Image: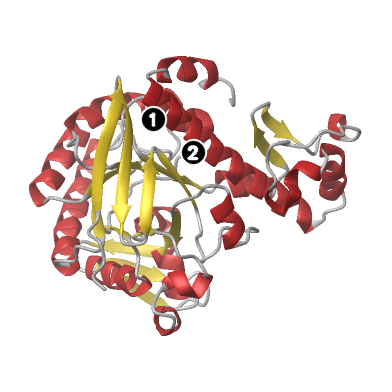
Amino acid sequence: MKKKNFSFELITQDDKARLGLINTSRGQIDTPSFMPVGTQGTVKGIYPEDILKTGTQIILGNTYHLLLRPGIEIIQKFNGLHKFMNWNKPILTDSGGYQIMSLSNLNKIDKNIGAIFKSHIDGKKIILSPEKSIQVQKAIDSDIIMVLDECPKLTNDKKILSNSIDVSTFWAKRSKVEFGKDNSKALFGIVQGGLYKDLRKESIDKLLEIGFDGYAMGGLAVGESQTEMFEILENSTDHLPKEKPRYLMGVGTPADILGAVSQGIDMFDCVLPTRSGRTGLAYTWEGKLNIKNSKYQNDQSPLDKTCHIRNLHKYSKSYLNHLIKSNEMMASMIISLNNIYFYQQFMSEIRKNIKSGNFSYFYKKYINYFN
């Protein structure tokens, strides 16, 4: 059976906020969309079937980490990551570019070779070239594949940022050649340029010349202020094609997402819902709640009375407070699931308000609600 082609449909706009639909061979993705992060082939502490029940339509996997462990040979025995982890919906894989930055003490960059890593697991030498990154993502059978890019740390040094664009563009060309013609999958380019609007425009122009199925904003959420991020998005999205999906990588808080949607971003991913869950921080329509606080010790109300997944509506804040203080792993499992559920409900409300033309009201109501 022939797999369906990847496509994106822009349904409507409310000012710059966009309502869209991505089609993949493994299902549709309503945008704006939030992708829970499954770095090691798992969204930490949550069963895949429960992730599905939250309304999640796509998750993210990590090329670098899956290459190291369990290794591509094992994943290929299952014909890809989907069967290996028991997830039958779309998967987007990052390219390893973020690890080039986050594990900079364990790698060096060679424009012609790629990133040369010393494995953080056993110290072995790992060469991640643009071609290797695409090969790994294809072996994973990812539905949306990212080009390998060089993501610099936050800096005002234009020379460093210009060099990053040069390297990333060269790698993007090589990535596209390696990707070849595969209508069942999508290849996204990644925009760099730091906090300089002219450099962002330069990066976008070079990527548009190559041509991709979608465009991601990289090099943000690396320490800049929320205001700085929004300003770069406001300028950059004006130069991106309307008929292609736009992805802001590694973002973020509900307020970050809301602000980025208002500037025309369609896709998001972040570890925040599950990482916060492991520290006792819950995202709810009441706001951001630190369940470790003693004020919840006698609170009999649930985090969300509407969430019936795993009977979450039956667990009181008092009980969760007890689990956290007792260092019980069930606390992080419950709160993480709650947080993913909330994020997906939040995205659903964003989409409803764009569709009805009320996004501006929703934006004003919630933009400062979770800070």
Q: Quadrant of residue 49?
A: bottom right
Q: Under tag 1, what secondary structure?
A: helix
User: Image height check: is 297 above or below 208?
Assistant: above
Does 183 sit above or below residue 361? below
The residue at the point 30 percent across, 52 percent down is: 23
Percent position of residue 52, x then y: 54, 55
**Which numbered circle lies on residue 252?**
2
Where residue 67 sits in the image (x, y, percent)?
Answer: 41, 73
- Badge 1, how many Cα within 10 Å: few under 14, some, many 20+? many
- Taking the spot 53% from the left edge, 73% from the top edge, the residue there is 121
Q: Is residue 296 left or right of residue 333?
A: right
What whole-number distance in Å separates the C-alpha atoms at marks 1 and 2? 10 Å
Tell me the tag on residue 294: none
Q: Are marks 1 and 2 in contact (CB under 8 Å)?
A: yes
State the image coordinates of residue 183 (x, y, percent, origin top left).
Answer: 19, 62
Residue shown at 87% from the left, 34% from the top = 300
Which kind of residue does numbered mark 2 sit on? Gly
Q: Is residue 228 visible?
A: no
Q: Amino acid at mark 1?
A: Ala
First reached walking from the N terminus: tag 1 or tag 2 = 2
Which residue is at a point 72% across and 50% down the rendered structure image?
334
Query: In the structure shown, which secondary structural element does the residue marked by tag 2 occupy?
Result: loop
Pick the front one: 158 or 330: 330
Q: Nearer the viewer, residue 39 or 43?
A: 43
The dot on residue 260 is 1
* Mark 2: few/some/many CA within 10 Å (<14, 14-19, 20+): some
Q: In which quadrant of the rendered image does the C terminus lie?
A: top right
